[in-house]
Image (cartoon, rainbow, N blue to C red):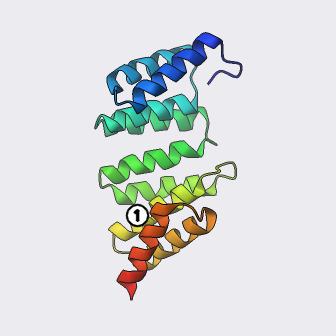
Amino acid sequence: MELNPTPEFTELFCKAKEHHLNGKLDRAITEYTALLNRNASAELYCLLGWAYCLNGNFKDAINQCRFAIELDPDWGNAYNDLACYLIYEKRFDAAIPWLEKAIQLESYDDKHLSYYNLGRVYEKIGMWLHARNCYEYSVSLSCDYKKAQKALNRIYAYLN
């Protein structure tokens, strides 16, 4: 986003996000695109990618994440989001390097999400111990993250 966003830009951003969260995806996509034409940011590219994903358009969702990474290689959400879209497409092996890159970023604060998603990949491909390790680490980073705790309990039950 703009470093010092104008009130107009902020209003448009809030409307786009509101439309997105209320399921008005085509409108949100149009608004995010207009905002990106004014001032590109990794966050906007990721939001546009998310809207595309929710619309079932994984190819464009992945491309938006690639644009975000190109613009800001330290924006960890883009790596994690891109991997999630690959997971939705059942391209598990392709998702692993993106999740590993997100985890390696020092500036990325939501590593618990990437560890959880990496656990999902390992679980899908039958690498149960790797999945367990990822889920355990996700929980250790964010003890309130219920999805990781639920997945960890499932893996414990499977391994016993």
Q: Residue furthest bottom?
A: 160
- Residue type, mark 1 in image: Arg
Give the labeled residue for mark 1: 120
Which residue does the image show at 48% across and 27% down from the upper left?
Answer: 17
Local SS, label 1: helix
Which residue does the image show at 47% across and 75% down from the upper left?
Answer: 132
Q: Nearer the viewer, residue 4 or 18?
A: 18
- State the image coordinates of residue 82 (x, y, percent, origin top left): 44, 45
Judge left or right: residue 106 versus residue 148.
right
Which residue does the image show at 55% across and 14% down from the upper left?
Answer: 38
- State the image coordinates of residue 111 (x, y, percent, origin top left): 59, 56
Which residue does the image show at 69% across and 48% down from the upper left?
Answer: 107
- State the image coordinates of residue 10 (x, y, percent, origin top left): 60, 18
Q: Nearer the viewer, residue 71 or 49?
A: 49
- In the image, residue 101 sits, relative to residue 1, either above or below, namely below
- In the image, residue 128 sits, relative to residue 115, either above or below, namely below
Quadrant into which the C terminus falls: bottom left
- In the image, residue 21 sits, relative to residue 80, either above or below, namely above
